[in-house]
Image (cartoon, grey):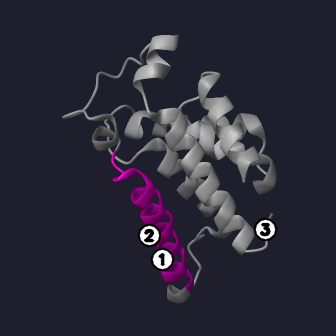
Amino acid sequence: MEKYRNRAKNLFESGYNCAQAVFLTFAEELGVDFKTASAISAPFGGGMGRMREVCGAVSGMFMALGVLYGDYGTDSPDTKKQQYADVQRLAAAFEERNGSIICRDLLGLSGKSEPNPEKRTDEYYKKRPCSEMVSDAAEIFALYLKEKGRI
């Protein structure tokens, strides 16, 4: 599991946003090319476009789950129920470790942020828990994949 934690952290610390860091961690295992995975997950950083809603690391797990077991409009209600149960389970695991799945709560902010991203400096990484959040999300999703026999 450590390799997934490290991969997500390294991606985040090399400039990818939180959602990208988690989703890209599993791109190869999911059969999604890196460029496409990066583009799909790009808007979800900063709690969805810096609106500070659901943490991008959590959204990255959900996108990965969707690639594995997505509803293509023809799935049965039982299949959809299972997908939603898995989403809730992944979210609960993240919340148990971090206290919330909401970006602004995790960062101690009171509302939305301006759309312009902050410059990634050493100081930026020191004041943000995001490296740990993406690592946690990657580990949680890797454990899920292991349980399902996918890795």
**x and y, in percent, of residue 143 in the image:** 67, 64
How far is mark 2 from mark 1, CA to CA? 5 Å
For residue 45, above or below residue 90: above
Residue beneath the point at 46% across and 57% down: 94
Quadrant in which the N terminus is drawn: bottom right
Q: Which numbered circle lies on residue 88?
A: 2
Residue in the foreground of this view, choosing between 14 and 98? 98
**x and y, in percent, of residue 12 in the image:** 60, 30
Tags 2 and 1 touching, CB below 8 Å: yes
Type of residue at label 2? Gln
Q: Is residue 53 left or right of residue 149?
A: left
Magenta span of residues: 79-102
Residue beneath the point at 32% across and 38% down: 52
Q: Is residue 11 left or right of residue 56?
A: right
Type of residue at label 3? Arg
Residue beneath the point at 45% across and 62% down: 91
Q: Residues within 10 Å of mark 2 (few under 14, many from 20)?
A: few
**Extreme-left residue of the structure:** 110
Q: Is residue 4 left or right of residue 103?
A: right
Which residue is disc 1 drawn over?
A: 85
How far is mark 3 from mark 2, CA to CA? 20 Å
Residue 88 painted magenta: yes
Type of residue at label 1? Ala
Visible residue check, residue 15: yes
**x and y, in percent, of residue 126 in the image:** 46, 20
Q: Secondary structure at mark 2?
A: helix
- Disc on the earlier residue, 3 or 2: 2
Residue 18 painted magenta: no
- Disc on the earlier residue, 1 or 3: 1
Q: Secondary structure at mark 3?
A: loop
Which residue is disc 3 drawn over?
A: 150
